Amino acid sequence: MITGGVLAVAVIGLIGLQFLPGSGHSGPAIPGTRTAAGILVPAIGTQTNVAYGRTLGSPDAPVKLIVWSDFQCPACKNFAEGVEGRLITNYVVPGKLLVEYRDMVIIGPESEAAAAASRCADDQGKFWPYHDVLFANQAPENSGAITAGRLKDMADAIGLDRTKFDACLPRTDLLTQIQAETREGKTRGQSTPTLDFGTKVIAGSPGYDSLKTTIDELLVQAGAAGSASPAASGSASAASPAASAPAGSAAASGAASASP
């Protein structure tokens, strides 16, 4: 549990983000290229036609997966850039799986800053593009790479309204949300990523085939079709506001945790 003193330090740190210099407005980049500020926009990003907020897929999907994650976690990056895309194509788009991102900030204050920035991007309906850019530009843990300037450059990279983003970034209520969400996540696992199917929790980032087996078993238990095949065309209906909303998140204590 974070003490009042530690939280106060976190709040001061987040407020300070608005006063740190950025590199100016560098403008968006074509996918697969870098902005003038050096921010890489991945060539292939998360499918946003099935996105609502921090969720992907239909709220009626028979299987639901919460991904408890930290933007500084290398294993989280591996999951986001590898396995997750195949799960979206083969299970989310056909309406069999709902994926929800939630913060479990355990590595340090830079993780906290990244989580806050992703919520500011979510306010503009671009959580997933920002999520992709954060992971694409991941640096060594707590190396000083996640600064206000770099977070703002990332906002430029995906075309966010910088006036709104800059005003959002120092909001202290984001810390309260991140803190609460992290506390909840730690009741489900102690490392990132933690893949939470409700009745089954998996620590780390297993391979696609292993997750496919798990999801197919859960689909059978739910009375849905077992194995999903890639969808050649069409998409699942996007999740609506009726989808279960994530509990508010939590400011990390700054205690580092090794990723699996």
Image: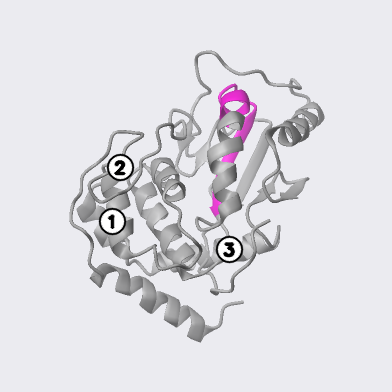
Instruction: Locate the N terminus by quadrant.
Output: bottom right
**Mark 2, secondary structure of its residue:** loop
Residue 182 is tagged as: 3
Name the kind of residue labelled 2 in the image. Arg
Side (left or right) of 62 relative to 235: right
Q: Disc 2, disc 3: CB below 8 Å? A: no
- Magenta-drawn stretch contains 97: yes
Q: Earlier in the sequence, mark 2 or mark 3?
A: 2
Residue 221 drawn at (x, y percent): 81, 31
Residue occupying image coordinates x 73% and y 33%: 215
Viewer-proximal residue, 22 or 247?
22
Of circles 1 and 2, the one toward us is 2
Residue segment shown in magenta? 88-102
- Foreground residue, 20 or 140? 140
Residue lying at the far left of the rendered structure: 24
Q: Which residue is mark 1?
A: 152
Q: Residue furthest top?
A: 232
Residue 247 placement: quadrant: bottom right
Residue type beneath disc 1: Lys
The residue pinned by badge 2 equals 34
Q: Is residue 211 visible?
A: yes
**Percent x, y for residue 43?**
40, 32
Q: Is residue 211 left or right of residue 59?
A: right
Report the Cα–Cα distance between label 2 and label 3: 32 Å
**Three-letter amino acid code of the residue under disc 3:** Thr
Q: CA distance from mark 1 to mark 3?
A: 24 Å
Q: Give the camera-side residue of 206 and 224.
A: 206
For discs 2 and 3, the disc positioned in front in the rendered view: 2
